[in-house]
Amino acid sequence: MSSCSNSLCAGSELSCSLTHTLSMLDSAAELMMVHTDFRAAFETCERGLHSLANTEQEDSNRCAEFKAGFCILGIQALAELNQWQGVLSWVLQQYEQQESIPAKIMQMCILLYSKVGEPAVMQDAARVWLHCPSNNGVTGFATVAELYLLHVLVPLGHKDEAVELIVGEVGSSAFTEEQRQTALDVVEEKEREKREQTLNPRSSPNSETTAQTVSTKGVVIRKLVAMLRFFYRNLLLTRSGSFSLRSVFLAVVLLYMLFLRLDPAHPSSFMWISKLLQLLKQMWSAMFAPYQAVMQSKEL
């Protein structure tokens, strides 16, 4: 039996290597969230990335997902170790070019550097990424544009570039007409506050960032919907045996930690409940519809 198992692994080397990679990703998540051993988690991520780099990537989509997973965990580990200064350079080591960074990792980097008060670090990388034609249609493009506007350009006071982003090609692709008008209002309000503060340095604005207050609902909705869709997709994979329930649980908790802990804005409304309910209904149907059909047939 052992000889047969070895023969199967030899005949499907890619499957065996991906199984090992998934195990490493699972271990890194466990070290991060259960044991809070951030150094060990980061080192596991680096070993996993090195293993992926030396693997013949026949299943490019799955390998890209694993690579993004290791990078997401690695970013969180560096942030917990207070080594956030090296996050962007480390990500660029993995993807080489700024425009090749996945949207969800670009979002994390913008939020991280915004939270530590260094939004300028992401200005060039985000600008290059948004103006790359191949990124225009990817999932998460609009969120990257919104975060870049509200967490980089507005805090830095780059009004002209912010307006150009909103009314230009990027804004037309990322935002609706109503969203563009709201974004312009935010930029104008921020500029007005800046002028008032210059004229009267002793006065301080009532809120730290009007931009965050106005945009919180849109950002939170997109993040929650993305997390739920990720969970739904992995539940389907769980039924086919590709993922363990433990892996799905760790992935969901990880996304919750990353998007809510790194985001300095707090939700001010709960309009997303309807979308949440809709996605939960889809997941319920996908998981239990076959069993319901069997029960109904038995009753008949």
Image (cartoon, helix red, strand yellow):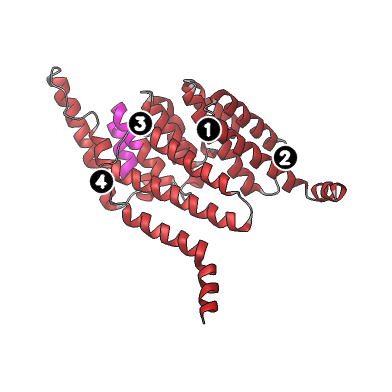
Q: Are marks 3 and 2 in contact (CB under 8 Å)?
A: no
Q: Are marks 4 and 2 in contact (CB under 8 Å)?
A: no
Q: Which residue ends up furthest to the top in the rendered image?
A: 202
According to the picture, the residue beneath numbered tag 2 turns out to be: 55
Q: CA distance from mark 1 to mark 4?
A: 31 Å
According to the picture, the residue beneath numbered tag 3 turns out to be: 152
Residue 179 vertical placement versus 281 (above, below): above
Name the secondary structure under disc 4.
loop
Q: Earlier in the sequence, mark 1 or mark 4?
A: 1
Is residue 131 visible in this depiction of the protein?
Answer: no
Residue under the point 24% across and 38% down: 213
Residue under the point 65% across and 40% down: 23
Tell me if residue 164 is in the magenta stretch: yes
Q: CA distance from mark 1 to mark 3?
A: 33 Å
Q: Earlier in the sequence, mark 4 or mark 2?
A: 2
Q: Nearer the viewer, mark 4 or mark 2?
A: 4
Kind of residue indicated by mark 1: Val
According to the picture, the residue beneath numbered tag 4 turns out to be: 269
Tell me where the magenta segment starts and ends, as one range. Answer: 149-167
Who is closer to the viewer here, 143 or 263? 263
Badge 2, how many Cα within 10 Å: few under 14, some, many 20+?
some
Kind of residue indicated by mark 4: Ser
